[in-house]
Image (spheres, helix red, strand yellow):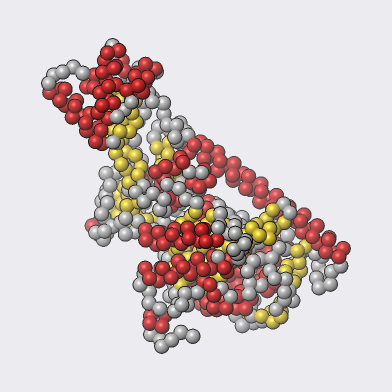
């Protein structure tokens, strides 16, 4: 259920408001929303300006390259990238660069002879060659072709060998062929945002990694850089399973093994495309994680792109929204408020609070999404019905200091430290910061007025599944350098809540799926999770129809093997604008396929019990 539009009022009881008071409340509401979103807009403009500048300088000029005649340093090989099972995701392919010292050609006849030979042997346009020879500006270097395939290169080399052996003087003997690596992504769109791209930065002498693993591990992957493994604790390459070593080591001798499982990634991307089509959403993200280690098993985004032809993609499609974009999470954030309230001891799982349908916090009146009140409700019913009024009461019981301490403990308002380029912080206003007001305590409790990234929300969910331990999410399982392997050790960033609290909340979230988010359930398995439908802010307030829907959860609940976060942007409201009818069933589809993929038996078999309740 959605987090309702916060209503603004005086501290007086909201039960009996006159028409004049209602008008005043609405005007204050618009003003307060407008002030907050001015701040968000400024942050967004600054971030967008930086991103656009980076894109213009680092990406848009990639396709231009160097002028055909400009000399350069030869590209150095880059290491390969494989998934956790050894499937090749990124490698170098080799081509030949064709160049010549144009001053060695003395006559037009020699130039014509060379142009004709290159066209016949390698398909290089004779007219293009002659034009380059006529207009070159660098006297000792002229690139005639930046990349011809190896077969064409061999034909030139064989013809040169024949001419040399016969002692024939021919301008083809003056040509230099230089083996040149180019990045190749055999899986095309698969995990494109995770692996990133390689591009020619403006004014650079060689290609560099941009975005994703290519960008984050640029110095390691590029043979030109003399980096070493950061730890002395390494293993021999022979210690890896044979399948993982299929394409390792690469010619560069420095390679990366991802935590990504190609098959899980394919499942996530397939289900994301199905959801996008079914609900006519504009964009989406699915993340699958191992909550115990922080390993990212899949990170799917739509729209995606082909790294082999990234110049053809929309600029916005190159940015990874799972780590590089923020959004208001809505009611899915209630699991954080519930965790904090339980852990601090301000409420128990069975303790009931009164829901009158509205509550005043600061100068705002908070309503439930359906504008109804439900009387005495405990935590399970409050989360199953997604009641804003009760969630705000938990936050008030915590108080400002404790509430925001727990928000920070779960990793919000700071980077998760995931090893992908360009991660952003999200946005959490806190007491003492400009434009924070006491009303924010109430609205933040159910995911309004703050912004998170999908990886932050998924990682916070993983902390609950992991007994309260917040892990550092990571996408690289190991690095290989000169035959030695350094594994990535799981890193605990902190303890968000006590293990006892995590267990209590897990049982509550199982009941939430069974009572309030049935579409997320998978028959035979206990699934823990929560949905969230976030309205999108505009100058006039929050929209009614345009929403961002999220479902986050984990399974099996008693022994979590995976966390799944599903986020869809702007599903068609004529189909459904609610997470319970869009993100939740998508979660169930992914979870069901993962149970099959990992051969996880149903709970009654796995736990040795006769039947599930």
Q: Check the image and report above or below for 56 versus 507.
A: above
- The residue sitting at the bottom extreme is 610
371 or 207: nearer the viewer: 371
Whether residue 453 is visible: no
Task: Report which quarter residue 203 is drawn in.
Answer: top left
397 or 453: nearer the viewer: 453
105 or 196: nearer the viewer: 105
Task: Report which quarter residue 14 is drawn in.
Answer: bottom right
Q: Check the image and report above or below for 348 versus 537.
A: below
Residue drawn at (58%, 75%), measured in percent from left and top?
516
Residue 237 relative to residue 380: left or right: left
Residue 571 x, y percent position in the rendering: 58, 59
Residue 159 x, y percent position in the rendering: 19, 27
Residue drawn at (71%, 63%), measured in percent from left and top?
5
Residue 10 x, y percent position in the rendering: 82, 65
Residue drawn at (41%, 45%), measured in percent from left and top?
307
Q: How many marks?
A: 0
């Amino acid at each position: 259920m959605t987090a309702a539009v916060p209503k603004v009022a005086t501290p007086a009881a909201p039960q009996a408001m006159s028409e004049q008071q209602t008008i005043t409340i609405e005007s204050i509401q618009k003003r307060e929303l407008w002030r907050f979103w001015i701040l968000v807009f400024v942050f967004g403009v600054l971030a967008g300006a930086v991103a656009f500048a980076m894109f213009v300088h680092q990406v848009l000029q990639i396709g231009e390259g160097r002028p055909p005649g400009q000399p350069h340093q030869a590209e150095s090989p880059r290491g390969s990238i494989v998934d956790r099972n050894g499937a090749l995701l990124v490698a170098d392919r080799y081509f030949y660069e064709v160049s010549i010292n144009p001053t060695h050609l003395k006559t037009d006849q020699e130039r014509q002879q060379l142009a004709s030979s290159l066209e016949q042997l390698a398909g290089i346009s004779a007219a293009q060659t002659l034009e380059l020879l006529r207009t070159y500006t660098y006297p000792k270097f002229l690139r005639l072709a930046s990349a011809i395939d190896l077969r064409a290169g061999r034909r030139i080399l064989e013809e040169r060998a024949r001419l040399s052996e016969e002692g024939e003087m021919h301008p083809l003997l003056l040509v230099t062929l230089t083996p040149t690596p180019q990045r190749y992504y055999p899986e095309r769109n698969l995990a494109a945002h995770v692996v990133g791209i390689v591009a020619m930065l403006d004014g650079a002498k060689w290609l560099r990694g941009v975005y994703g693993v290519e960008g984050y591990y640029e110095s390691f992957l590029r043979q030109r850089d003399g980096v070493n493994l950061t730890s002395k604790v390494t293993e021999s390459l022979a210690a890896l399973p044979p399948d993982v070593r299929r394409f390792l080591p690469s010619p560069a001798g420095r390679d990366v093994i991802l935590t990504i499982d190609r098959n899980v990634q394919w499942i996530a991307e397939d289900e994301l495309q199905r959801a996008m089509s079914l609900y006519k959403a504009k964009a989406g993200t699915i993340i699958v994680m191992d909550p115990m280690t922080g390993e990212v098993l899949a990170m799917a985004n739509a729209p995606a792109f082909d790294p082999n032809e990234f110049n053809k993609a929309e600029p916005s499609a190159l940015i990874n929204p799972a780590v590089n974009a923020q959004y208001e999470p809505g009611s899915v954030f209630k699991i954080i408020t519930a965790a904090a309230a339980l852990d601090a001891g301000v409420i128990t799982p069975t303790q009931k609070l009164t829901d009158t349908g509205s509550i005043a916090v600061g100068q705002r009146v908070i309503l439930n999404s359906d504008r109804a009140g439900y009387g005495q409700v405990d935590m399970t019913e409050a989360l199953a019905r997604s009641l804003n009024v009760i969630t705000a009461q938990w936050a008030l019981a915590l108080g400002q200091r404790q509430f925001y301490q727990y928000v920070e403990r779960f990793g919000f308002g700071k980077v998760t430290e995931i090893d992908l380029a360009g991660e952003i912080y999200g946005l959490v206003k806190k007491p003492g910061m400009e434009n924070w007001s006491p009303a924010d305590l109430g609205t933040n409790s159910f995911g309004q007025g703050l912004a998170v990234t999908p990886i932050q929300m998924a990682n916070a969910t993983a902390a609950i599944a992991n007994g309260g331990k917040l892990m550092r999410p990571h996408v690289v399982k190991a690095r290989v350098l000169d035959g030695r392997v350094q594994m990535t050790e799981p890193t605990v960033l902190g303890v968000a809540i006590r293990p006892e609290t995590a267990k209590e909340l897990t049982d509550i979230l199982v009941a939430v799926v069974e009572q309030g988010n049935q579409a997320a359930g998978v028959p035979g398995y206990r699934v823990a999770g929560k949905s969230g439908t976030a309205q999108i802010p505009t100058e006039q307030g929050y929209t009614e129809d345009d929403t961002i829907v999220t479902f986050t959860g984990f399974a099996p609940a008693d022994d979590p093997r995976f966390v799944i976060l599903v986020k869809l942007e702007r599903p068609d409201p004529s189909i459904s604008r609610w997470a319970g009818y869009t993100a939740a069933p998508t979660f169930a589809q992914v979870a069901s396929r993962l149970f099959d993929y990992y051969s996880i038996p149903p709970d009654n078999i796995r736990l040795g019990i006769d039947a599930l309740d």
